[in-house]
Every structure is written in C-alpha cells, then in structure tokens.
Image: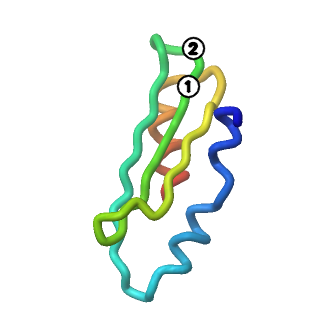
Amino acid sequence: MTFNEIEKTNAAEVLAALPEGAEVEIYTDGCCLGATGAPAASAFAIIHEDKVIHSAARFLGPGTNNIAETTAALDGL
C-alpha cells in the first residue's frame, strides 16, 4: 500500500452515518520539510465517544506548511 492509498473513504460519508446531533472532535496536522517546496503531507482523525471512527493521510507534493495544515483541516470537515 502506498501513502496515497491510505485515504480511501470520505469523511463526509462517515459523519453522515452518525446519529443526528452526535458530537465529534476532529484533530488535524499538516507538515512540510523546510519553508517551501519540500514535500508536504496532511492527516486528520475524527473522534466520537473516545474512539477513532475515521482517519486519513495523504501526500500533497511540493507546497508550504500552511497549505498542508489547511488541507488537513478541510479534509477533516
């Protein structure tokens, strides 16, 4: 399995399957080696009732840390 194959399900589908009014916590992180240009990655985990119900990570290619962090947050939503 390659790093890009980790993300196989859609976070929206997972969240839609929860009961109405369910609360979740979304933890995100993005990283980039160096200021710009170095490969970037993003990841997130969705927590419901103290259990990870979905998580994903992906390689973004060259970019900045801000792009990686923002992409992780948007992917989690």
Q: Position of residue 54 (x, y in %)?
A: 50, 59
* Residue furthest front as drawn: 1
- Please indicate whether residue 58 sits to the left or right of residue 27 in the image: right
Residue where numbered disc 2 is placed: 38
Q: Position of residue 9 (x, y in %)?
A: 65, 59
- Give, as a three-letter code, the residue at label 1: Ala
Q: Residue at x 55, y 70 (%)?
A: 14
Q: Secondary structure at mark 1?
A: strand
Which quadrant would the N terminus be assigned to in this image? top right
- Give, as a three-letter code, the residue at label 2: Ala
What's the image's color scheme? rainbow
- Please indicate whether residue 31 sits to the left or right of residue 40 in the image: left
Residue where numbered disc 1 is placed: 40
Q: Give 67 or 28, whichever is nearer the viewer.
A: 28
Q: Position of residue 21 (x, y in %)?
A: 37, 85
Q: Residue at x 49, y 42 (%)?
A: 43
